[in-house]
Amino acid sequence: MNPFLITGYKSQEYFCDRERETKRLIESLVNNRNITLFSRRRIGKTALIHHTFNQLKRGEKIIIYIDLYATRNQKEFTELFANAVINAFDSVFGRMTEKLKNLLSSLRPTITYDQFTGNPVFSFTWETDKHVETTLENMFDFLNNQKKEVIIALDEFQQIAEYPQKNMEAILRTNLQKSPNVTCIFSGSQDHLLISMFKDKSKPFYQSGELFHLEKIDLKDYEKFIAYHFKKGKKEIDKPNIELILSLSENHTYFVQYLCNRLYSTDVNIINQQVIYNTLLAILKENETFYFNYKNLLTANQWNLLSAIAKENGIKQITSKDFIKKYDLNTPSSIKTALDVLLKNGLVYFDSNNYVIEDVFFKIWLQRT
Ligand SMILES: Nc1ncnc2c1ncn2[C@@H]1O[C@H](COP(=O)(O)OP(=O)(O)OP(=O)(O)O)[C@@H](O)[C@H]1O
Ligand SMILES: [Mg+2]
């Protein structure tokens, strides 16, 4: 098995460090403090949540993980939520408890079975939004009345701000306030939506938990992790070349993992500089279709700005005379308009006062063209 995972979470063995972060999450959760975990995309929030849940003594707590990414409205939220709750109880108790049966009979779901896993999937018929709200209330009541504490991760939480029902945040907040037995991790990418949900005085979730910004993994820890797994897989690599991997992928979790995964799967046993560059070039080549696709989707203004940010390797003063002149860009106002689009679709990211290209490999490709 390739030890460098590029999706999901397996176990501690394949998870690099994050000891301090795991400890901090556990500390908040066991003391019933809600916490909001946010970061740049693909730094490792979801994996950290699974790792934390893995470390928490299951059995002692009821643990529920929900990924809201694909939900578009209150109904889909409630359905996903109900399914996650019912399945969590099923796996905790191995069979349905009386309370769960009662809850289910009040919700009157239709039960089908997942074609692949055989797990039950519940769907519901609700006539009105009010009816959906009542179901949510019932679910929270049910969780609040458990003997064990309940911990829920709501991943991609910013999604709920996009629902057409504008009162979803308020409904959730009210339910949570009435349920002291339930503690939440809210997690999501660091976009304006998520931050404003917790920092904006007019929003229901204002100051309703700690904000926790997830940074990159410590370089030294990543070095050790990479060295350990290559050695275990009988692949030779020296320290300068591990440093090269980390520098090319900017120590950004997903890109480090991806490059290492590919290097691990090459048939050579000595990972030297040449192998690393060749592998990176192969990755860029494979992604070229996507990159050209972006070029087609963006206007010339947007594309030129993207390319300039890449070549500059990040820029602070995006409308400065020097920057405009160097890359032959348009007027400051047209730069701002283009920038908004690039930020909105996640191609550019604002990181410690710098505008940078979100995708590290795409940036390298742009720099080379
Ligand atoms: N500490 C770690 N050690 C090893 N691999 C990790 C670690 N953290 C995350 N990963 C891997 O990095 C990739 C990205 O992680 P993850 O999906 O958790 O990021 P994310 O911040 O939730 O991303 P998104 O913002 O897209 O939801 C995954 O393939 C995951 O397996
Ligand atoms: Mg995630």
Image (tube, rainbow, N blue to C red):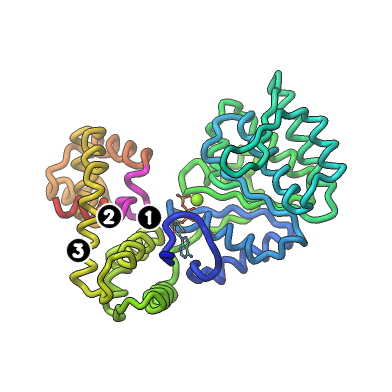
Frontmost of labels 3 and 1 is 3
Task: Report the residue at 34% width, 38% height from top.
Answer: 340
User: Which kind of residue does numbered mark 2 sit on?
Assistant: Phe
Magenta-colored stretch includes residue 276 = no
Label 1 element class: strand
Label 3 element class: helix
Circle 2 residues within 10 Å: few <14, some 14–19, many ≥20: many
Tell me the magenta residue range: 346-360
Task: Report the residue at 33% width, 46% height from top.
Answer: 348
Residue occupied by mark 3: 278
Frontmost of labels 2 and 3 is 3
Q: Position of residue 72 (x, y in %)?
A: 54, 31
Magenta-colored stretch includes residue 350 = yes
Residue occupied by mark 2: 361
User: Which kind of residue does numbered mark 3 sit on?
Assistant: Asn
Q: Earlier in the sequence, mark 2 or mark 1?
A: 1
Q: Position of residue 347 (x, y in %)?
A: 32, 44
Instruction: Name the image quarter holding residue 149.
Output: bottom right
Q: Is residue 59 left or right of residue 354?
A: right
Residue occupied by mark 1: 351
Q: Earlier in the sequence, mark 3 or mark 1?
A: 3
